[in-house]
């Protein structure tokens, strides 16, 4: 049975939630069509001290969603051309989020948002059917031995934080 992941699921440690998102389904309802993609790659951004996180310099207009309650989408525009889809995690006022990097069918966070027609209108919205974008647990369990941990992509400027193993992906999804 398909179960929509609740705010309670996301209101936990970002690093745990990130790994447990692998094998869940990102679901988008668009123009009376339902698109269902299995999540196979994510990156965690965890707290005030994480220099790769938008929140490392404090709360701003751009990142304020990261400080809100878990279970909300944090969508931002980058490089003047791409939207990035993140899920806010952890307790309110603790800035943490998980970037959805890829699915079995679509590799790369910019390709994913383009394919799903995701833009800033989702920023700050709860992940549920009402907003047209949510995550479902369909009973697929990814074994710890199938999860690869690695450094995040595109954050080399963050010193020691660049090498933190906060990127998680399913072994078969390596590219």
Image: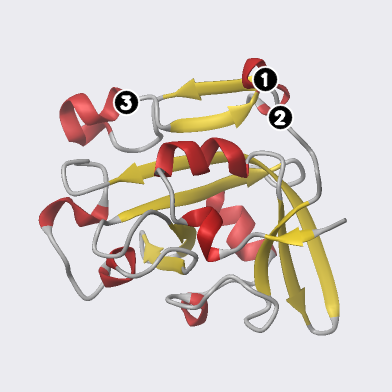
Vertical relation: 140 (above or below) 32? above
User: Please, what secondary structure does the residue beneath circle 2 have?
Assistant: loop
**Image location (x, y in percent) of residue 116:** 68, 66
Q: State the quadrant of the N terminus.
A: bottom right
Foreground pick, 115 / 14: 14
**Image location (x, y in percent) of residue 28:** 72, 69
In primary-sequence order, the first of circles 3 and 1 is 1
135 relative position to 53: left or right: right
Vertical relation: 72 (above or below) 158? below
Badge 3 local density, few (<14 within 10 Å), some, or many (20+)?
some
**Image location (x, y in percent) of residue 52:** 26, 42
Give the CA separation, mark 3 to mark 1. Answer: 19 Å
Residue drawn at x 52%, y 31% is 168
In primary-sequence order, the first of circles 3 and 2 is 2
Residue 171: quarter of image? top right
Badge 1 local density, few (<14 within 10 Å), some, or many (20+)?
few
Residue drawn at x 24%, y 63% is 93
**Image location (x, y in percent) of residue 149:** 49, 22
Residue 153: quarter of image? top left
Q: Which mark is residue 35?
A: none
Badge 2 local density, few (<14 within 10 Å), some, or many (20+)?
some
Label 1: which residue?
Answer: 146
User: Please, what secondary structure does the residue beneath circle 1 have?
Assistant: helix
Mark 3 vs mark 2, foreground winner is: 2
Label 2: which residue?
Answer: 142
Residue drawn at x 73%, y 23% is 172
Label 3: which residue?
Answer: 164
Residue that extends furthest to the left in the rendered view of this protein: 57
């Amino acid at each position: 049975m398909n179960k929509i992941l609740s705010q309670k699921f996301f209101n936990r440690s970002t690093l745990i939630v990130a790994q447990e998102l692998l094998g869940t389904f990102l679901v988008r309802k668009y123009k009376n069509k339902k698109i269902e993609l299995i999540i196979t790659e994510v990156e965690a951004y965890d707290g005030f001290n994480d220099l790769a996180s938008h929140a490392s310099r404090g709360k701003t207009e751009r990142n304020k969603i990261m400080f809100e309650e878990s279970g909300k989408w944090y969508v931002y525009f980058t490089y003047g051309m791409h939207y990035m889809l993140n899920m806010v995690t952890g307790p309110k006022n603790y800035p943490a989020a998980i970037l959805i990097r890829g699915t079995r069918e679509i590799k790369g966070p910019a390709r994913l948002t383009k394919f799903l027609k995701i833009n800033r209108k989702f920023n700050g919205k709860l992940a549920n059917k009402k907003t047209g974008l949510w995550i479902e647990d369909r009973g697929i369990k990814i074994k710890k031995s199938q999860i690869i941990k690695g450094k995040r992509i595109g954050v080399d400027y963050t010193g020691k934080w660049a090498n933190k193993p906060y990127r998680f992906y399913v072994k078969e999804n390596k590219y």
